[in-house]
Image (cartoon, rainbow, N blue to C red):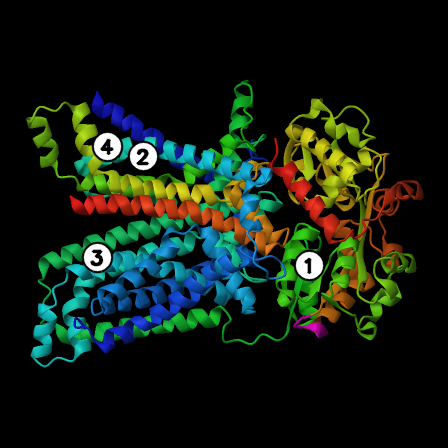
Amino acid sequence: MFKKSKASVALASPYLAWCLIFILVPLGMIFFYGLTDKTGAFTLSNVIAITEKNNLKSLILALILAFISTVVCFLLAYPLGMILAKNKVNSKGIITTLFILPMWMNFLLRTLAWMTLLENKGVINGLLTLLHLPNINVINTPLAIVIGMVYNFLPFMILPIYNSLARIDDNVINAARDLGANSFQTFFRITLPLTLPGIISGVTMVFIPALTTFAISTMMGGSKILLIGNVIEQEFTLTYDWNMGSGLSLILMIFIIINMVVSAVSDQKEDRK
Amino acid sequence: MKKKLEKIYMGIILLFMYLPILTMIVLSFNESKSRSKWGGFTLKWYLNLASDSDVINAVANTLIIAIISTLIATIIGTVTCVAMVGLNKKTRAVIMGMTNIPMINADIVTGISLMLLFRVLHFNTGFITVLIAHITFNIPYVMLSVMPRMKTISPSVYEAALDLGAEPFFAFRKTILPDLIPAILSGAMMAFTMSLDDFIITYFTKGSGFDTLSTKIYNEVKRGIQPEIYALSTIIFLAVIILIMARRGLRARSMQAAGKKNVSYAKKSSKGRNFAILFAVIITCIFVGLSFGGVFRTKENQVYVYNWGEYIDPDVVKQFQKETGIEVVYDAFESNEIMYAKVASDNAAYDVICPSDYMIARLIKENMLQELNKEKIPNAYANIDPNYMKTAASFDEGNKYTVPNFCGTVGILYNKKLVKEPVESWDILWDKKYKGQILMQDSVRDAFMVALAKNGYSINSTNPDELKVAAKDLLNQKPLVQAYVVDQVRDKMIGGEAALGVIYSGEALYTQRENKDLAYVVPKEGSNVWLDGWCITKNARHVENAHKWIDFLCREDIALKNFEYVTYTTPNLKAQQMIEDESIKNSKVAFPDEDTLSRCNTYLYLGSKADEMYNRLWKEVKSGE
């Protein structure tokens, strides 16, 4: 098994076949549909369609909302990760479990919970009315979508950041302190760079789903706000234009590839150290 | 001081994470359907949930898919990781590269790519396609967990075992597997979690009549949030907590046990048997799950029905199943366009569908329907009002393809408490007074109809200038609109969430039963009168049963029962005569007078060019500000 043998090839071949049929061929089909028109002739128009006003708008809005959500998640998760990593009680993991427990609830139920809270006649407005305070009007706005994204994806940011923080050797921090670094310097020159891989993986795990979601924007946005995910989804389920839908998906893949390159580069840097 | 700050910070985030869940738990015991009022303690939502077989099926599907896909993915993933060590560097890199694709790719891209594959290969079954999709995205989680561990294992013990005469598999089981177990388990756990939580990939790969919890909830939310969902959330939350506690307990115990006894290679006999038992259990699980999913069952006596949401009395479906013994697989759509996309991409997905006039014309023109066998649906010809048959003939020459089901108008439903002035014109939907109080239809033709009629244009306009004016009006209206919805109008109007909503006539009578303040009006500028009919798809798999379904629904007692539930105008003359309730019989909403009808027109199929124009402009409205 450890030698280069025919047995290894035989054992790996089911998976290779699986990858071929269910990963590579389907991806190839997106390229095929995205780069042809309804008659099957080659065209770039489905990809160029992203420059149309409506599509571009939904892409830019999705980028903005995903960016804001990622930043908010990061700002919330990093201090939390530091607190959790520092807490020795936490070695048993009870507290960490508490923070990722909502992840096991169904994703749509989590979103539904916020719909319930933010609706015009929802729980928050009900309480505000009870207290004779003016009602808030958040549901069906971009803010509601951001709240939905942050709530759903926060555990995906907490987990990798916490893991990378917990892995830092205390001695490294102590050494920096001994050499005269103040806590500010220690943080920016030692802790932050050491947790960069965790941050990058957290950012990826929040940014990509946020950029490409259509469920959160439909539920929290009342179908008034179209993100690029909604546009693509509707090309398949409403307009019945597979070519256009695939073409726009190719645009999404560009962002995914950029993300891959960024994490690969940081991995390499990590290796060189 | 710092400690305190830290605790406060953690508290705030915990509050942020758990408050929504706690709210749902509280609301699951709320007698009142309203989300902002406490109506007393009740368990009725739990009881309702327990009798809702659709939800229970969806939960079962979710669990079966998660368990089987995790087991298969764990086996394939582990075997591959072990095999990888024996492969050359290049092959290894290729495999790891492919493994990374589903991890990094957006769910929507993975989902769409698999959907394209299944559609092109004409895969039908919902269960198997979802299972394949889940295995595909689960394998990487197992591999990425097992691979790093595998790399650290030194081959020397294994080789020593071989030298001592052990069979390769025995040696592997004794030397390598024990070291891999923790990594395999954590990979499997991750895969299981991801499978349970997945929505997007399931959404694209599920076929007709199959739902997991996620897709079920998504459909439910589109209809409006029902308190039963809160009960479901509470149960799931408790189940998760119990599972996690159990896992922690188990782990603590096994750690204790490990501390007491030194587990050694010597205890081989019982271990060997354990392994065999485990393997047998896994295989049994997979087979039991697969047969539950219906893979080995050839279910012939079925009929796949695709109907509008909120468009049938559930008891009618039950009665049909009881009387005929045919299992009904029932899905609902929100608009003609959604129905079209589904039927066009997989014509055999459903046997019987219920589109509207203009869409029937389109389906006939594109050769997606089959002619009805008139001998098999005698009730239709005996009971349906000949006038409606004539109307149907206007888009279905010779009444070959469709039998009228329901008809109605489009109008404004408003809450008399919130709208004090008389509602006569579509213009009120542009009145700034009602900002955030207006619900518009999330369907191209209906939305444009409102704007076209408001401007005095034909509701079947194909004039680009007129359509641009209409689109501009819709854009101007957008800031006033609370949401674009279809089936949610009902729930939101009953709950007083909005003052005005564009809605189909049948919903008016239904909602008035629940909220007396609601009134329905067909504006003076005119509107749409529509006729929905039952059709059988070209490639239907259960043609015989489809005819039985149509004939059953045309039977006078069934048509009456159905009418009394959905309250759209029934074209069934005998059923009309049997209505006892005078107020419904004389209701102008259920049976509009000549004056109203003279203002209304049917939609015509405008051709693919005009369709594209409508769709493009509608997208502009939806993505505009």
Tag 4: residue type? Ile
In the picture, the disc for residue B315 is: 1
Q: Nearer the viewer, mark 4 or mark 1?
A: 4
Q: Nearer the viewer, residue B438 or B416?
A: B438
Tag 1: residue type? Asp
Q: Chain of mark 1?
A: B
Prevalent SS, magenta region: loop
Q: Nearer the viewer, mark 3 or mark 4?
A: 3
Q: Is residue A137 left or right of residue B141?
A: right
Going from N to C along the chain, the mark reached first, 3 or 1, is: 3
**SS of the residue under disc 4:** helix
In the rendered view of the protein, which quadrant contains the C terminus of chain B? top right
Task: Name which residue lies at 74% across and 26% down.
Answer: B419
Q: Name the residue beneath numbered marker 4.
A: A83
Q: Name the residue beneath numbered marker 3.
A: B148
Structural distance between the alpha carbons of marks 3 and 2: 26 Å
Q: Nearer the viewer, mark 1 or mark 2?
A: 2
Structural distance between the alpha carbons of marks 4 and 2: 10 Å
Q: Chain of mark 2?
A: A
Structural distance between the alpha carbons of marks 3 and 1: 56 Å
Q: Quadrant of residue A24?
A: bottom left
Q: Nearer the viewer, mark 3 or mark 1?
A: 3
